[in-house]
Image: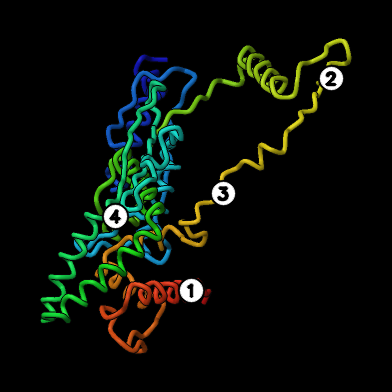
Amino acid sequence: MSEEAKKINEKPPKGELINIEIDKAKKAGMNLLLPSIHMEGLSEFHSPVLDYCELSPEISDGDVYFHSESKKLVPSKQGLMKLAMCAGIMWDMSRTGRTDDRKSRDYVSYSACGAVRRIDGTLVHFPAEYDMDFAVIEEKLRDQYTKKGKSAKKTGDELHGYIDYCVKRDLLYKREHKLKICESGAMTRVIRSLLGLKAGYTAQELKKPFVVARIVFRPDYSDPEIRKIMIKKSIESITGIYGGVDEDVNEQISFTPIDIPTSDFDNEDPPDPETPDNLTSEKADFLASDNQTKITTLETMAKRADYDLKQIKKPLDKFTEEELEGFFDKLDALLDIPF
């Protein structure tokens, strides 16, 4: 065979092959995660693979929500968790959890630390923190509702009453869900930073999948020596769990009963009473939004549920925080009904 024919029949190196696939994904307009991707010098025991993850551009599916200022779709916690699973983000639970001393009812902080594995096997960690200082939040809410009240031409006692009512209402709501909001905020900051996500996406961009390249250990199992080693390691892992092998008694595995004290289960921490069991990720995003974003979200949900907003007795911008939540639950239930 000529040298030219050999070159044609030769397969490109694994690193070059995956780079070709990545270039194809870029040209197709797919959304690349971990943007600094370039693979070279892979060993014979490792192979590159591309994983794909799709997020629904439909707000009712819960993967994204509409951001009123940027006019774009932003991945919700549900969507971000899908991307984190696809990219293989690992959470360092020793550095993930509530970090405040819990002595003040006006301050709560939550820290999260995630990591992704590089091609050489090392882990890249990224920590992030999200906190809520209710003294600062109250000042911001007062400024927000002062401007809103004046734009509605409220003055004097009417303006002050309007501001006090709205601020108290919003603060109580944020206090009720403070831990859920902080946990979601810290974890989503980690995911966005590690994966290099944009601040927002158009519906057209979300119609194309997100792509992540990773390395898997894939030895040649047809090699007798490799198979022998893998079988040996498999047996060692089993005996490490269930006990050693007694070669004198037909190589049967001996099992040793384990006495588990019931106190190990009795001492488990009770669930956090501040976090409602039925709070979905999309509802958590809704609750953490400002009033205008909530109204925009409800209008979008009503349109998708074919619900005529003329049926409600007053405009959405006149709804209280509790009424907005109740209307969200109603529309969410309508969207869950199969047609």
Which residue: 35% across, 64% down? 172
Residue 328 position in % (x across, y down): 40, 72
Disc on res. 270: 3
Q: Is residue 110 above or below residue 176?
A: above
Distance of label 3 from label 2 (alpha carbons): 42 Å
Front tag of 1 and 4? 1
Assign a secondary structure to mark 1: helix
Question: Answer yes or no: do the residues labelled 1 and 3 have beta carbons within 8 Å?
Answer: no
Marked residue nearer the N-terminal end (1 or 3): 3
Disc on res. 175: none
- Taking depth in this image into account, of 237 and 261 the one nearest to the observer is 261
Question: Answer yes or no: do the residues labelled 1 and 4 have beta carbons within 8 Å?
Answer: no
Q: Which amino acid does label 3 sit on?
A: Pro
Classify 10 Å Cα crowding around label 3: few (below 14), some (14-19), many (20 and above). few
**Residue that label 1 marks:** 333
Assign a secondary structure to mark 2: strand
Residue 161 position in % (x across, y down): 21, 77
Which residue: 34% across, 54% down? 75
Disc on res. 252: 2
Distance of label 1 from label 3 (alpha carbons): 30 Å
**Residue that label 4 marks:** 205
Q: In which quarter of the image is residue 61?
A: bottom left
Front tag of 1 and 3? 3
Assign a secondary structure to mark 3: loop
- Taking depth in this image into account, of 142 and 64 the one nearest to the observer is 142
